[in-house]
Image (cartoon, grey):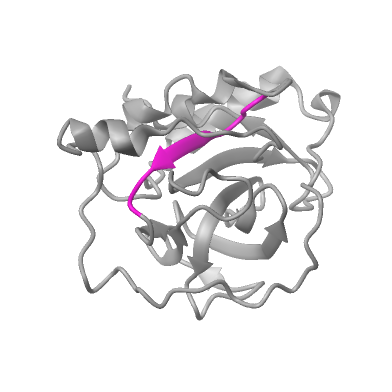
Amino acid sequence: MARSNDIARIFVPVLLGLGGLWLPSVSAAEVKASARANPAKNAVSSEVKKAPEAEISDEQVASAISDLRTRHLLVPIDGIPVERFKGSFFEIRGETRHEATDIAAVRNTPVRAVEDGTIEKLFLSKLGGNTIYQTDPSKKYVYYYAHLEGYEPSLTDGAKIKRGDIIGYVGTSGNAPPNSPHLHFSISILTPEKKWWKARALDAYEVYKPK
């Protein structure tokens, strides 16, 4: 999840200086200039706590990565090379591991669902800003999308979505640097209780990297 000291690397100015080669192109039909966050159903709250490491073993993490690799998950932002995910999970932010990947992109770039599933919660927090918690069809995993500029207007808690559906837009809500729009994205394994706020994060790069 996003941390209180989660100061993202300011990739955009550097990459623009190189011609912005890896930033995705965004069509006028997809970028909605009027995209705004839906009214929050929760008051601003502290970030949801992860499940204790002991509840989900390292062996379960390895098995989950193998399972997820067979699903060929969609990268949540079009045109982003998977190599950009490498190492981000282990970066230290403040006193804790990042346990996510930050994907720099132009503000209001569409964010897509990585696979079919259910919107468990549209959640507003001090750290992650406008966030989405999506579970997969088997309710084994939760996908977390944070720092959104806004949600797709029709999106609601409990909505059933398909792989590739636009669910939100890249932004800088929460504690993201205001001049560095990006998506904070993570994949976590749910505990047996199947609650969206109780999960253990795994390294998304290990899921997406080429064989």
- Residue lying furthest bottom: 154
Which residue is at the front of the view, 120 or 126? 126
The structure residue drawn at horizontal position 47% and vertical position 19%, both measured from the top left corner, is 87
Residue 183, percent from left and from top: 47, 47
- Using residue 79 as the reference point, say whether residue 185 is left or right of it: right
The structure residue drawn at horizontal position 61% and vertical position 65%, both measured from the top left corner, is 119
- Using residue 53 as the reference point, say whether residue 94 is left or right of it: left
Residue 202, percent from left and from top: 61, 29
Vertical order, 23 against 93 (above or below):
below
Name the image quarter holding residue 44: bottom right
Which residue is at the front of the view, 174 or 103? 174
The structure residue drawn at horizontal position 60% and vertical position 64%, both measured from the top left corner, is 118
- Using residue 24 as the reference point, say whether residue 103 is left or right of it: right
The number of numbered badges drawn on the structure is 0
- Using residue 47 as the reference point, say whether residue 188 is left or right of it: left
Name the image quarter holding residue 91: top right
The structure residue drawn at horizontal position 52% and vertical position 43%, both measured from the top left corner, is 177
Residue 140, percent from left and from top: 66, 46
Vertical order, 71 against 113 (above or below):
above
Which part of the image, by quadrant, shows the C terminus? top left
Vertical order, 114 against 10 (above or below):
below
Residue 149, percent from left and from top: 49, 62
- 177 in magenta: no
Which part of the image, by quadrant, shows the N terminus? top right
Chain part drawn in magenta: 97-106
- 101 in magenta: yes
